[in-house]
Amino acid sequence: MLTGRLVALRPMAAADLEFLADLTNAGPVRTHVVGWDWPVAADAQREWLAQTHRDGRNRRLTVTDAATDEPIGMTGLWEIDWHNRSALSAVKLMPGRAPKGAGTDSIMLMMAWSFYEVGLRRLHSTILDFNAASLGAYVRRCGWRIEGRERQAVFRRGEWRDLLRVAILRSEFDELPDSAEYVERVCGAPHRPADAGAGVVRQLAEMTR
């Protein structure tokens, strides 16, 4: 269990399946996610979950409200490349359930876990050009950079839309003002002398680079 300011991340369980089917079928979610598939039935989710647990290159996590433990979304790592220490990451949250700031909190937790527990050095993703909420969370608040644009790559809402490629390196995550807090949330408090003083938060980021 990874706990942030607003959310917690935990492995997916059978109890989450009905919620995950609702999340996949939710109209606003289907509009804004990059991938596309047919609507899913809750019954089909059991086989999907079993396949998920057997898949060594992908790790999906349920996002829960830290205050209530109710599921509010999903996140994870996809296409894990152990040789190049990179992976695709994304987050989907149920409209109306997630508290304000849950997306940013989820992304920061995933970055800290990916870089300081899993051992990756680069995360990447794709965002549709009209998805202002995701661009704000990833690029403006969490330090990801736009690395390219695929023109008219995705058919959505009856139109061809551009796809933005975004990514972040561990060194760029380390430069974020709140990175040390999230590393401590994931890894625990660093060992330090009792008189280490107020500079310990900055030192944590420097020590673990």
Image (tube, rainbow, N blue to C red):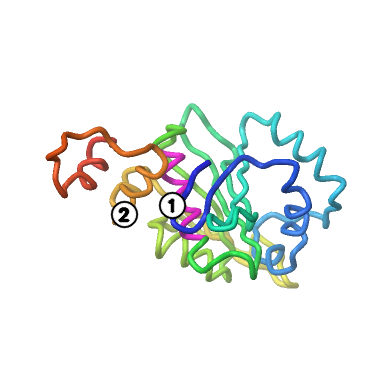
Is residue 122 in view from this perspective? yes
- The residue tagged 1 is 108
Start-end of magenta stretch = 103-115
Kind of residue at badge 2 = Leu
**Residue 157, x across and y down, in percent:** 73, 72
Residue drawn at (35%, 43%) of the image: 184
Position of residue 118 in the picture relative to residue 127 (left or right): left
Horizontal relation, residue 206 to residue 136: left or right = left
Residue occupying the point 60% across, 53% down: 69
Q: Decide whether residue 10 is among the magenta residues.
A: no
Mark 2, residue position: 176
Which residue is located at x 57 percent, y 51 percent? 90
Q: Quick check: is 111 in the magenta stretch?
A: yes
Contact between marks 1 and 2 (CB within 8 A): the answer is yes
168 with respect to 92 (left or right):
left
| Residue sitting nearer the eye, 208 or 184 | 184
Distance CA(mark 1)–CA(mark 2):
10 Å
